[in-house]
Amino acid sequence: MPRPEPMPGYGQLLQCGYRSLAGAVRSCTDCGWELSRRTWAENASLGWSETLLCLLCAIGWTWLRRAASGCLFRPFGEWCNLQPKDAAKMPESAWKLLFYTLSWSYGAYLLFFTEYPFFHDPPSVFYGWEKGMDVPTDIGIAYLLQGSFYGHSIYATVYMDAWRRDSVVMLIHHVVTLTLIVFSYAFRFHNVGILVLFLHDISDVQLEFTKLNVYFKHRGGIYHRLNDVISDLGCLTFSISWFWFRLYWFPLKVLYATCHTSLQSVPNIPFYFFFNALLFALALMNVYWFLYIVLFVAKVLTGQMQEVNDVREYDVEESKKTTGPRKAGELQLPKSWKEGNHLKNGLIKDKRL
């Protein structure tokens, strides 16, 4: 087993990544649709039974979320006497916190409490790669849970979640992530997939935990300082973890391995450009959301914001702007993007809570 390589810097990533990408472009003399079709036929391993199971689990996540929200989260919010606008958004954050905590904990177990060396030695994700190789059961379980959840999340972003300024980007993110999960499983790049999911889930855990404390700091008509302090600390740790996991470790561990060292282990690795394009798109979205974090910090430092809040949320006054009457049950998704309406269960509802 080769000794783990030291983690590169950004300069080495750019230099080696560019050299490897340029070399791959020069060596690809017949790139195109025909090569893609042939590569898929020769290397992809994805059965209908696996696809159906993932779809059924996605439906199961949707049903479970509705049940948990109706029987647990909403009644708990009413019992705590949350403000109406907070009570409306609390079930979404509670549901996401529950899932991401479980998924990240399972990812941490795989990377730090088993024999998988992927976190400390990212190039090892491609050691011994073979087309159609067996996926270990523990990694297969993680893929089933994550793939089905992101399938559910595409539906939930449009029909169940509060509509935010970045909801379109969030929808694209879910599509890109689900595509990466499905294709990485089919081409047996599951090792690097586990590392990608682990590096991203921790930020979601901290984000939803912080938002819940924001919702709970005003309840029963009383200000609760403890939740306010926890939300401030959560915002700080969230900002740090976002940079560290998604903007530092993700490119230097994952992109370096997929762009550069993958060609050293598997010179003719299938769909090299496709996978790296999706991973770079994921990195760009991480930078996009980091700008929201910078915007939040700037507002706090300049005194424009006195307390922790989600700067992606539409302001109350903005949400009251309408251009005309709507028919009940009529789905007008493009208009909702412009007006900042709240989409829920296929209906457009003004966020006037």
Image: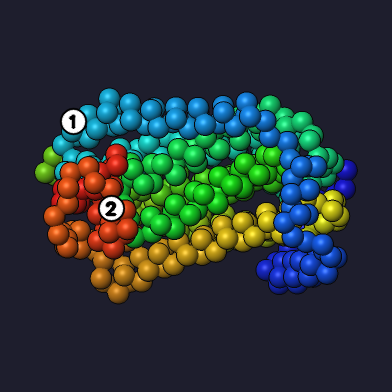
Question: Dot 2 corresponds to which residue?
Answer: 332
Q: Residue at x 66, y 44 (%)?
A: 183
Please state the total of marks drawn on the protein image. Answer: 2
The type of residue carrying mark 2 is Gln
Which is closer to the viewer, label 1 or label 2? 2
Residue 241 position in % (x across, y down)? 51, 54
Residue 165 quadrant = bottom left
Q: Considering depth in this image, is 197 or 8 the residue closer to the camera?
A: 197
SS category of the residue bearing label 2 = loop
Residue 47 quadrant = top right
Q: Is residue 331 visible?
A: yes
Q: Is residue 308 visible?
A: no
SS category of the residue bearing label 1 = helix
Q: Is residue 244 left or right of residue 114?
A: left
Q: CA distance from mark 1 to mark 2?
A: 34 Å
The type of residue carrying mark 1 is Trp
Q: Which mark is residue 302?
A: none
- Image color mode: rainbow
Outermost residue to the bottom: 302
Residue 25 quadrant = bottom right
How many residues crowd around disc 2 within 10 Å: few (fewer than 14), some, or many (20 or more)?
A: some
Q: Which mark is residue 79?
A: 1
Of mark 1 and mark 2, the one earlier in the sequence is 1
Q: Is residue 110 left or right of residue 213?
A: right
Q: Residue at x 26, y 66 (%)?
A: 305
Outermost residue to the right: 1
Q: Residue at x 27, y 25 (%)?
A: 71
Q: Residue at x 57, y 28 (%)?
A: 52
